[in-house]
Image (tube, helix red, strand yellow):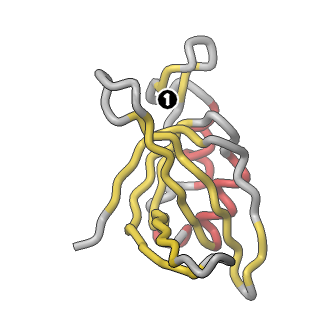
């Protein structure tokens, strides 16, 4: 089974773009390895269509996000003829992770993100995938 769950913060503002008939956004999430470690992993993610629209509309650099998806590995040959392997989390679902703007700490129901989820429905609803 190929399932990935990550919780972290966006490293930059996601930008929406067209890819044929689809909408897509590529972004990176900074994910701390553990609360006792000072190391962080930077996970590349891709979201499509309505999921991509919601992420680009409501989230910005530094915002926390919870993602469920699949891990995809690909490869290409660079200009020097060397085979390069890439990894990306293909976003299937995501959740807004509200945070307290005064403390910058995630707290359930503490920011407008909770209102956004209430007004648009759960991002886990299949109509947003």
Corner quadrant of residue 19: bottom right
- Quick check: 63 above or below 38? below
Task: Indicate the secondary structure of the residue bearing disc 1.
Answer: loop
- The quadrant of the rendering that contains the N terminus is bottom left
**Image check: 116 left or right of 30?**
right
Give the residue drawn at x 73%, y 52%.
Answer: 57
Q: Position of residue 100 (x, y in %)?
A: 56, 20
Q: Residue furthest bottom?
A: 20
Tag 1 residue: 109
Above or below 15: residue 126: below
Task: Give residue 119's position: percent from left, percent from top.
Answer: 61, 48
Near mark 1 (Cα within 10 A), the count class, few <14, some 14-19 or many ≥20, is few
Q: Nearer the viewer, residue 91 or 32?
A: 32
| Most distant residue in the top direction | 102
In the image, 112 versus 23, the foreground residue is: 23
> Which residue is more in the foreground, 80 or 50?
80
Position in image of residue 75 (x %, y %): 50, 79
Looking at the rendered structure, the number of numbered marks drawn on it comes to 1
């Amino acid at each position: 089974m190929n399932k990935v769950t990550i919780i972290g913060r966006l490293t930059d503002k996601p930008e929406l773009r067209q890819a044929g008939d689809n909408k897509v956004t590529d972004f990176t999430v900074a994910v701390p390895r553990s609360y006792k470690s000072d190391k962080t992993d930077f996970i590349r993610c891709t979201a499509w269509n309505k999921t991509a629209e919601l992420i680009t509309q409501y989230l910005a650099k530094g915002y926390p996000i919870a993602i469920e998806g699949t891990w995809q590995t690909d490869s290409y040959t660079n200009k020097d003829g060397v085979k390069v392997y890439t990894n990306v989390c293909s976003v299937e679902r995501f959740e807004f992770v509200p945070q307290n703007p005064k403390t910058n700490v995630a707290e359930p129901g503490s920011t407008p993100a909770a209102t956004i989820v209430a007004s648009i429905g759960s991002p886990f609803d299949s109509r947003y995938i």
